Image (cartoon, helix red, strand yellow):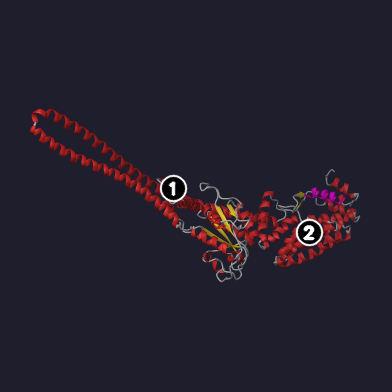
Amino acid sequence: MADLAHDASGPASSEPAGFAPQQTGRPASSDDRGKLRVFISYSRDDLDFADQLTAALDFSGFECFIDRQGISGGEDWKRSLGGLISEADTVVFVLTPNSARSPICDWEVEEATRLNKRILPIVCRPLEDVSPPPRLRELNYIFFYKEPKVPGSGFGTGLAKLVTALNTDFDWLRDHTRYLQRAIEWDAGGRPANRLLSGDDIAEAKAWVARRPKSAPEPSALQLDFIRASEEEAETRLSEQRKQLDAMAAAQAERETALHKAEEAQHKRATMARIRNIALVVVSILAVLVAWFGWNADQQRKLAEQQTKLADQERKVAEQQRTIAQEQRMLAQQQQKIAEEQKQQADDILGRAENIIFNQRNQMDAKTQQEAFALLTAGAIHGDTFAMFGLGAFYADGHGVAQDFAKAREWLEKAAAEGNEFAELKLKELQIREAATAGRYAEALRLEEAFAVKLEAWETTREGKPGTDTANALTNAAWWGLFAKEFTKALAVADRGHALFPDNLRIEANRAHALMLMGHDEEAKALYLSHKGEPVAGTGKLWEQNIPEDFAEFRKAGLTSPMMADIEKELGISR
């Protein structure tokens, strides 16, 4: 995908990007292994998109930090920015014409590259003729807008791909950040020996380098120096111990030589005065021999203990390496399972959003509607036409948000301008609902009739015959005719609906209502009583439950007939 931006070129921008102390969750200490920490690099001109991205990633379980204040004149911004980048596990670069021209964004890329940080470039709108920073040209891009050359691209799919990419090599990257922080502190403090790794930590660090996933960045030179220096310091300490043992052995040899010389001298003195001093010589020699044998035995014991300790350490290292290999296999299996679960979660959210939009009678809980509304909002802001249509439908129907016809019209018109045919139909429906809500029932009747004609032609072209949408429009038109007191028109529309859909009980109910309000009592009564016990599709209720509810709406609007009470009694409903 990277070749989509390779032909871009243009002048650099002096505009600052991507730095300020304000964050949405500053990274915790290096020992906190709860969430992956993400640094978002972007141009100030793209702040709206960066805020939406941050909200989406926070919702997906990541810890983001981002500039929202800019760079002050006297601030050492490179040191501050460098610290934030070094503490992050991954850098997400928002690639736009503005960030591609920004020298500060380019510096952030270079700094992340210097620290061997993983960089994930995302594109939220076309780059036009601007060339991205050189370090990003060979990377694969994730598109958050509908890119014609990339099928299925858009904000929703882009977010799902980004979440999957962030969770790849999760633990290895967390350790990358931890070792980098230790190495930076060691280097900044003059590389003292007391800040190096020791014991089992050295073996763990070397195993971490060895198990680097192919898709992860290489360990930095500073990290490798830090681990190498730790290993050399440990070897130096071990060498000092061995030198001490060698010195003890040399001292033992010197004592043996001195003892031999002393024996020779004593022998000569004994020859000269053997009788006089033989007893004293024997006692002295025995005392020296006892002391020497005791000291020699002690030294041999200490040497054996040191050798045993070294053998134990080597055995532990071998066991740790076997354990690391087993853990590596388990981690790979866990990461694959996590990626599959997160992809399924993203698909479920998109599926629930589509169910709410295209199946108005599918009742979902408020939390699910709010999740779908948040996803549609993010996608609509960044140009996804399906998300624009869905957001307009949510505002029109009051799903996940308070009903707002003005906002519904705004988003539906944007989707229609992008060629979304569903948005054009929803705008017609919205116009009718606005008229009816305002009490302009005659206007709602005329608009609904015209809408029914369009739907009938549209469904006939697509399906070969009128369908559910046409039936709903004819039902609504007859209903508005009743409230407009155009009973003859309401009956004509209901008869038209009955001819097309003879089994639709909602249309049959409007036929009965029109006959009653026109004074055709016998026909109305026969029709009212002919469907008792039958379920009314789409309402979850029986005919005798649905009819009294319609009567209640008529009474509120001042539409009355003496038959209403009789029909309710005949249907077995008490008021």
The total number of labels drawn is 2
Q: Where does the image place residue 284, in percent across and percent down from the top left?
A: 17, 31
Residue at numbered disc 2: 502
Nearest-to-viewer mark from 2 and 1 = 1
Residue 195: give its label. 1
How many angstroms separate mark 2 from mark 1 (CA)?
A: 85 Å
Upstream in sequence: badge 2 or badge 1: 1
Left of 178 or right of it: where is 391?
right
Q: Residue at x 70, y 65 (%)?
A: 420
Magenta span main SS: helix
Region of the chain picked out in magenta, as a range: 542-555
Let me know if residue 466 appears in the view. Answer: no
Q: Residue at x 72, y 67 (%)?
A: 417
Looking at the picture, does residue 530 appear above or below residue 144?
above
Secondary structure, mark 2, is loop
Q: Is residue 223 left or right of residue 572?
A: left
Identify which amino acid the numbered label 2 is placed on: Pro
Name the secondary structure under disc 1: helix
